Image (cartoon, rainbow, N blue to C red):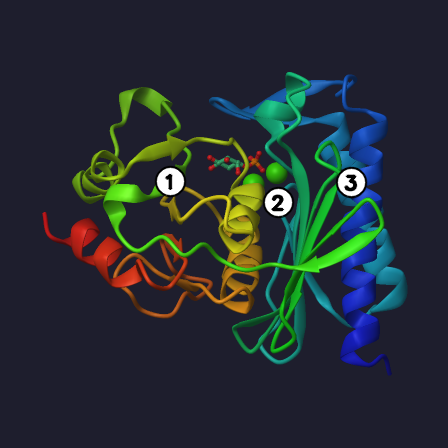
Amino acid sequence: MDTTEELHGFVCDVARRAGELQLSRHEDPGEVREKAPKDFVTEVDLLCERLMVDAIRERYPDDAILSEEQGGSVSETGRTWLLDPVDGTANFMKANPMFCACVSVIEDGTVTHAAVAAPRLGDLYHARLGNGAYRETGGACSPLRVSGTETLEYCVVGADLSLYGGRTQEPGVEEVLFGAWQLRALGSAGIRGAWIAAGYLDVSVGTQNTVWDYAPTVLLVSEAGGRATDLSGEPWSLSSEGLIATNAALHQEILQVLNRT
Ligand code: IPD
Ligand code: CA
Ligand code: CA
């Protein structure tokens, strides 16, 4: 039986290997299919998923896997792997460098391990429950720490505004965005979450993402000294509809603004 450290090394390795595959194809996404309106899957998404799933099945055959393209299930009693083979597919299709591979492990509803490999940035962000969050880049490993920003007025907020079917943001989200200093829409929920942990962004607002997008943010941000909850301030769970991740100092203010309309 592997130790949690060995398991963590493997989590990082799976993300890293998918990232390497992405990098080798970053200007060649292959066949692209519109699986739902304005929701695309490329040949590279499928290849990365195959690589990740095969590696996990070989090493941990009893674990459950839930992955974006092939689906799957969450184990009631054991470990589940949440996989986003290419997060930021819309960027990847355009050879925009903001894409990553996301791997998380959950057990009993708690995210215990997470890794986000962003190969065009040269970064691997990872966290293990109770053991901190880190960035590996160019062979060096450094701890991640959230920002020290104290008020919304001076916040750099990360949020992806999908312009789907003319939908506007919910009123509370608009209040947060317009109350902030600056907005970044990166096109990758995985990188957005890692950048809260790294202190590059102060707040992340997610309302349209899925569990494989949110899970890495939950662990990376909390292990880097921040807070991640659902939109009403309750602990995030697999059935939560959204995720607010902050540097902790800002969390109450963001929740108040978000929920006052
Ligand atoms: C998407 C990205 C994007 C977010 C979308 C996600 P995908 O993931 O994270 O930033 O706005 O909601 O679906 O589809 O590229 O894995
Ligand atoms: Ca995603
Ligand atoms: Ca994806």
Residue at which label 1 appears:
156
Give left or right: position of 58 versus 198.
Answer: right
Mark 3 belongs to which amino acid? Gly
Q: Which SS class for mark 2?
A: loop
Binning the other alpha carbons within 10 Å of mark 1 as few (below 14), some (14 to 19) or many (20 upward) gives many
Q: CA distance from mark 3 to mark 1?
A: 27 Å
Tell me where residue 158 appears, x and y as whole percent.
41, 39
Residue tagged by mark 2?
A: 68
Residue 214, percent from left and from top: 50, 53
Task: Tell whether 12 sits left or right of 32.
Answer: right
Q: In the image as oriented, which residue stretches furthest toward the left?
A: 261
- Residue 173 is drawn in which quadrant? top left
Residue found 38% across the figure and 40% down from its top:
156
On the rendering, which quadrant does ligand 3 occupy?
top right
- Tell which residue pokes out farthest to the right in this image: 58
Residue drawn 56% across the image and 52% down it = 198
Residue 19 is marked as 3
Name the amino acid type tagged 1.
Val
Q: CA distance from mark 3 to mark 2?
A: 16 Å
Q: Does any portion of residue 42 appear in the rendered image?
A: yes
Q: Is residue 34 above or below residue 51?
A: above
Callout 1: SS:
strand
On-image quarter of the N terminus:
bottom right
Tell me which amino acid carries mark 2.
Glu
Q: Is residue 70 visible?
A: no
Q: Secondary structure at mark 3?
A: helix
Q: Quadrant of residue 89?
A: top right
Q: Nearer the viewer, residue 89 or 225?
A: 225
Disc 2 CB within 8 Å of nearest ligand 3 atom: yes
Callout 1: CB less than 8 Å from ligand 1: no
